[in-house]
Image (cartoon, rainbow, N blue to C red):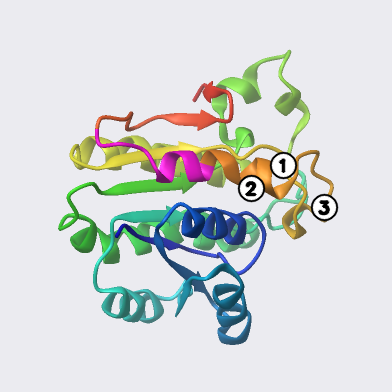
């Protein structure tokens, strides 16, 4: 049975991806900071719960010891930091968002790569965003051109670079970034235009990627997305 860990999976896209992957036959670990919410989500999805705070070294290390074996890692945990304009951005706000959205995946990858390397078909899915695309941000015709929230956007651009570099470093793994699209969740106060089922679709698709599937790419529901 394929074993999958999803960080930040007690609600929203992470929970829906967990639910769909359980239905696809995966043994899923729901990683969450809060014991009660995490266990409740795991029970609802038919998954297992592991306490995992991506901002804490000891928590991540303890989670790796408990999980023991892993085939698929979904780096889903993330925060927006709020709709911070360029004039309001500060180093402290940047550091807070990067701690979860960038340093968190690095911390989790460092702890779980030894387990992934033992898998016959290791997969990593980094949950990114279209606002992290430099190409789309610079395109005058792109809807993301007006999304001038540099703190969150730069954290996702950094995550995309991690995807490229880790994919190059671990060619046996399938490591990709995915953009779920503007999905109605607590993350954006349910302003999104997609359902959570629609948003989770691309996460699940690349979690189920075959051994000959792409790696080092950036994808949304419709296919490749520009960096």
Mark 1 neighbour density, 10 Å: few (under 14) some (14–19) many (20 or more):
some
The one of 58 and 9 positioned closer to us in this rendering: 9
Task: Name the spot of residue 59 as percent of width and height, x first.
Answer: 40, 80
Q: Is residue 89 above or below residue 27?
A: above
Q: Is residue 213 above or below residue 16?
A: above
Q: Which mark is residue 2?
A: none
Q: Is residue 42 left or right of residue 214?
A: right
Task: Name the spot of residue 114 as percent of width and height, x first.
Answer: 19, 62
Check whether the beta carbons of the residues at disc 1 and disc 3 lie within 8 A of each other.
Answer: no
Q: Give the residue at mark 3.
A: 190
Q: Give the residue at mark 2.
A: 152
The residue under the point 71% across, 28% down is 144
* Real-space CA distance between mark 1 and mark 2, rounded to the nearest whole angstrom: 6 Å
Mark 2 neighbour density, 10 Å: few (under 14) some (14–19) many (20 or more):
many
* Real-space CA distance between mark 3 and mark 2, rounded to the nearest whole angstrom: 17 Å
Q: Is residue 204 left or right of residue 1?
A: right
Figure quadrant of residue 105:
bottom left
From this viewpoint, is residue 150 visible?
Answer: no
Check whether the beta carbons of the residues at disc 1 and disc 2 lie within 8 A of each other.
Answer: yes
Mark 3 neighbour density, 10 Å: few (under 14) some (14–19) many (20 or more):
some
Point out the image quarter for the N terminus: bottom left
The residue under the point 36% across, 57% down is 106
Q: Nearer the viewer, mark 1 or mark 3?
A: 3
Q: Give the residue at mark 1.
A: 149
Name the residue at the bottom extreme. 36
From this viewpoint, is residue 129 visible?
Answer: yes
Q: Nearer the viewer, mark 3 or mark 2?
A: 3
In magenta segment, residue 205: yes
The residue under the point 73% across, 42% down is 86
């Amino acid at each position: 049975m394929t074993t999958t860990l999803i960080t930040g999976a007690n609600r929203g896209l992470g929970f829906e991806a967990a639910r769909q992957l359980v239905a696809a036959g995966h043994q899923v670990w729901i990683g969450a900071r809060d014991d009660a919410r995490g266990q409740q989500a795991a029970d609802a999805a038919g998954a297992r719960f592991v306490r995992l705070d991506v901002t804490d070294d000891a928590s991540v290390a303890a989670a790796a010891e408990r999980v023991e074996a892993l085939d698929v890692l979904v780096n889903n945990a993330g925060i927006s930091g709020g709709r911070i304009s360029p004039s309001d951005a500060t180093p402290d706000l940047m550091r807070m968002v990067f701690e979860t959205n960038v340093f968190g995946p690095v911390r989790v990858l460092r702890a779980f790569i030894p387990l992934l390397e033992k898998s016959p078909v290791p997969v990593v899915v980094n949950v990114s965003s279209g606002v992290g695309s430099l190409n789309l941000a610079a395109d005058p015709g792109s809807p993301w051109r007006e999304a001038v929230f540099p703190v969150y956007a730069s954290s996702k651009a950094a995550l995309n670079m991690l995807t490229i570099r880790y994919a190059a470093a671990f060619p046996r793994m399938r490591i990709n970034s995915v953009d779920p699209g503007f999905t109605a969740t607590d993350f954006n106060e349910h302003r999104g235009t997609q359902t959570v089922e629609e948003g989770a679709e691309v996460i699940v698709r690349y979690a189920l990627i075959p051994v000959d599937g792409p790696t080092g790419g950036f994808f949304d529901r419709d296919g490749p997305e520009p960096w």
